[in-house]
Image (cartoon, rainbow, N blue to C red):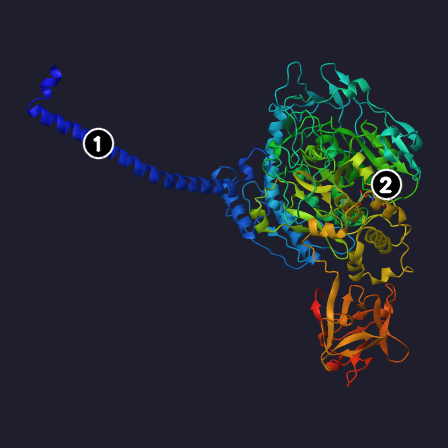
Amino acid sequence: MRIRKYFRGSGRVLAFVFIASVIWLLFDMAALRVSFSEVNPQLLKELIVKEREALKHQATTRTPFLKKRGPKLPQQKSDMQRLNEVQFAFKVDEQAGGRAADAAQVTQDLQLGPDKKAARENKDSELKRAHKNAQSDAKLHAKVQVKWPKDLITNTSIRAAPIAVNKQENIAKQGMHVRKEAISDTQKGIHVPSKASVKIPKELPKAPPGAKEEELHLTPKPGKKSPHTTGASKLVVVDKSKNNVLDTGATSEIKADEKAHPKESPAGDDNSLQVKVKEFPKMDKSKDQQSNISIPVNKKEVSKERDGGPGMGKISVLNMKEAGGEVKVNSTVRVRDSGTHKVLHIDVTQHPRDAKVIGQFGQPAEVAKDKEVQVMKMWNEGYFNVYLSEQIPLDRAIPDTRPQGCSEMLVHNDLPTTSVIFCFVDEVWSTLLRSVHSVLNRSPPHLLKEIILVDDFSTKDYLKEKLDEYMSQFPKVRIVRLKERQGLIRARLAGAAVATGEVLTFLDSHIECNVGWLEPLLERVYLDRRKVAIPVIEVISDKDLSYMLVDNFQRGIFKWPLVFGWKPIPEEIIKRDKIKDSDPLRCPVMAGGLFSIDKKYFYELGTYDPGLDVWGGENMEISFKIWMCGGEMEIIPCSRVGHIFRNENPYKFPKDRQKTVERNLVRVAEVWLDEYKDLFYGHGYHHLLNKNNVEVGDLSEQIQLRKNLKCKSFKWYLENIYPDLEAPLVKAEGLIFNLGARKCLVVEKEKLSFEVCDLSRQNQHFNHTWLRHVRQQNVCLALKNAKDDVGPVECDRADPQLRWLHKSHVFNPPLLEHLILEHLPQPACLEADRKGVAVLLRKCDPGSPFQKWQFTNYYAE
Ligand code: UDP
Ligand code: MN
C-alpha cells in the first residue's frame, strides 16, 4: 500500500523518470560493454606484442652470467645479431652487478678467405688477448671474431673443425662463472676430496611405491695414487648402504678367441684380426647388476615418441625430406614402459678443482717464454701443444656449452647401456687419459658398460705396461691390443667385436666429453635403434688447449670429390622451420670420430667396410650406408664433446698416405655412388680410373651387402638427404655448335661431320661428361690415327686419350670455348675445316671461330 502511494500524482511522474533513467543507464552500460569488447582484442594484441618483445629482449639479452649454468652463447644468428647479443650480454652483466664490464669492445672480423694460416695467427693473438682478459677480474673487453671460411671444405686430407664461435672472453668469463659454481658445488658435496656424491636429481619422477632412491657415492680407492697425474679422478663406485667397493682393479689377460661375450658379439667369429684383450676383472655381478643410480620406473608412462622425446623438439627436416616418406618398421622403434627423468648432471672429480691451475675451465693456457723451445720440441708428438697438455689437469672442468633447455631435457629411465670405444695409435699420454677421464667422470655409471681402449699397434712404450697399470684402477676399462697395425677402421671393428654394451659409442682418443653428453645420444638410439646419434663436436685448440664452443646449426656434408666439411643451416630456414638450437639435426655425412650406434644395428648394416685402410673415407662409407640402407643420422646439440683438431696425422701410414686415402675413397665411390661416381673421379681423381694407379681390392662382398640390405640408390640419397648438393650428371649436353662453320657436329656412319643444327636429330646430341669425354651413347671423340683425323671411338673410362677440356680454367680464358685434347705434349684443339665438312685437330688458336664450340646446355664448369 505504501508503495502504491508513491505511484500516485507527481509520484507517478517521478517513478516514470526513475524507471526511464534506470533503463537508460542499462542501455548505456550495454553500449559501453560492446565498445569494450571491440577494444579488448586490440588491447590484447598490443599486450601480446609487448610481451613478445619483452621475451625477445629477454632472449637476446639472455646471458650466461644470469643463469645458473654456464653460458649458452647466442648461436647461429646473423653476425650483427650475434654482436648485438654480446653487447647486450655485457650490459646485462653490468646491471646484474657482476664485474664492472667496461665498455664492451666488440669487433667483427668477417674472415672470408680460407687462408687457414692467417686465420690461425689471428686466432692466436685473439686467444692471447682473451687469456689476459680472463685474468683480469675487473675489466672485460669483448673481442668477437666470427670466422667464416670461404669454402667449408678443408684440404682433402684433414677433416675440418666446425666453425667455432670464438668468443674466448665469453668462455673465459664463463670459466669464472663455473669457478664460482665449482666452489658452491664443493659445498654441495660434489667435489669433496675424500667422498664425492652424485645425488639423483629431485626432479626425477616420483618413484612408484616400493622403489627406493639411492645415492651414488664416489670415493677414491685408498692408498693407490695415480702415478702420472695431478688430480686425476678415480671412479670407484661404492654402495654406501653396504659400504662395498663395487669396482676393484687387478689385471688378467684373456685371448681374443676367448672373448668375454661371444654371443653378444656378432663379429665374434671373425678371426681375421689378431686381437689381444687385456681385461680387468669383472665387477661382482650381484653388485654390478644393482644399478648404481636407481632410476625409478614409472609404469604408467609409455614412450611412443618417434620424432623426438620430451624436450627434444621435433627433428628438423630442413632441406631434407622425411627419409623416403616410408613408415618405419616397428621393430626398430622401442615402445617400452618407462618413465623419464631430467638428464643427469654428473661431473666427478677426486679433488676440488683448483681454479688457478693451468687450463682449468677450458681456458686458454699460456706457455712461459722460456718454454717455447720445449713446446716446439714436443709439438710433433701429437701435432698439437703436447707440452701444455701435460700441464693441464686430467679432469679439468670445461664450460657447459649446451644450448638452453638441454639440462631440463627429459630422457627415459631405461636407456640402453653403452660400450665406449677409443682406438689409438701413438696417442699422447695426457690426451688419452683426459679422454678416458672425461667419460668416466661425466657419464652415468649405470649406462657406461665399459670403456674399450684399442691399441692399434702403437710404438710408444708408455702405451704398454704403464697404461695397463694406470688403467687397472678402473675396472670398467679394458684394453685390446692389436698385433699389427690395422688402421682406425679395423681397430674400431676389433673394439666392437668385444663390446658388451647395447650401444657402441666411438670416440677419438683426444677428446673431452662435456657434462650430460651421453644420455641425449642414447635417448635417440632408444627411440629408434636405426638412429645414429652424433654429438656436437667442439673445438679444443691445438695451440692453447682452450675449449671453444662451436656454432650450432652446422651439418656435416661433403663436397666433390668426397671431401668432408661443415655447412651452416641458412638463417631463413632456421626461422621458417622454427628450429631450436637444441633440436636434433639430420645430417648427410658424419665427421667420423664420434657417434653412438645400436650394436646390433651396426652389425646388421655390415659394420664398416673392413677393406678400408688406416684412415679416411670411412665416415663417407658409414654415412651413405646408414642413410641409403634405412637408417638416420642426427647431430644432437644437447650432447657436446670437445676434440683436438690437428693439421696433420701424428702417426705414420704404413703405405703412402695420399694413396691410402685415395684407395679408400675409390672403394666408397665404387660401392655407393652409382652413376654419380663420375663426379668423384671428375673432380681431380681421373688418374684413379687407371687400375695401375690404384689397387682397390675386392669389392664384391660390399656390393653384395648393398644388394642384400636392399639399400636405396645414391640418387635417392641426394634427392632426399642432401638435396642442396649440386650433382649434375654431365658437365654439358645437347648439340655442339661450331661458331666458324655455324653448323653442328654429327656422327654418321661411324664418322664425324657437320649438319645444319637440328635438336630432333639424336645423332647430333652429345654429352661432355665428368670424365671429360665428348660422348654419344657409347662412342667418344678421339684422335683416330697418327694424322689429325678426329672421329668416334668406343669409350674407355681409363683412357686419358679421350679426355677433352672445355670451359676449363686450366687454360687461359681465350681458350675457354675450345675443345682441347689434353694428353698430348702440346695441347691441341678441335677445329672445323673451312668447308664445314671435316673435323680436325690443330694447334690451338685463341682467335679462330672454327675452334670455338658451344653445347646447348651447361651444368658445371
Ligand atoms: N687411429 C688408429 N689407427 C690409425 C689411425 C688412427 O687407431 O691407423 C685412431 C687415432 O688415434 C684417433 C682416431 O683413430 O683416436 C681417429 O684418428 P684421427 O684423430 O687422426 O682422425 P681425425 O680426427 O683427424 O679425423
Ligand atoms: Mn681426431
Number of marks in picture: 2
Looking at the image, residue 496 sits to the left or right of residue 174; the answer is: right
Residue 499, label in figure: none
Residue at 78% over, 49% down: 620
- Residue at disc 2, CB closer than 8 Å to ligand 1: yes
Neighbourhood count class around disc 1 (C-alpha, 10 Å): few under 14, some 14–19, many 20 upward = few
In the displayed structure, 837 sits above or below 62; it is below
Residue at 92% over, 29% down: 258
Give the percent coordinates (x, y) of residue 18.
15, 27
Q: Amino acid at mark 1?
A: Leu
Q: Amino acid at mark 2?
A: Ala
Looking at the image, residue 172 sits to the left or right of residue 696; the answer is: left
Q: Are marks 2 and 1 in contact (CB under 8 Å)?
A: no
Give the percent coordinates (x, y) of residue 87.
52, 47
Residue 25, label in figure: 1
The quadrant where ligand 2 appears is: top right
Mark 2: which secondary structure?
helix
Residues under labels 2 and 1: Cα distance?
A: 90 Å
> Is 343 in front, or is 434?
343
Asked whether the viewer can see residue 185, the reply is: yes
Mark 1: which secondary structure?
helix
> Is 815 in front, or is 749?
749
> Is 802 in front, or is 243?
802
Residue 491, label in figure: 2
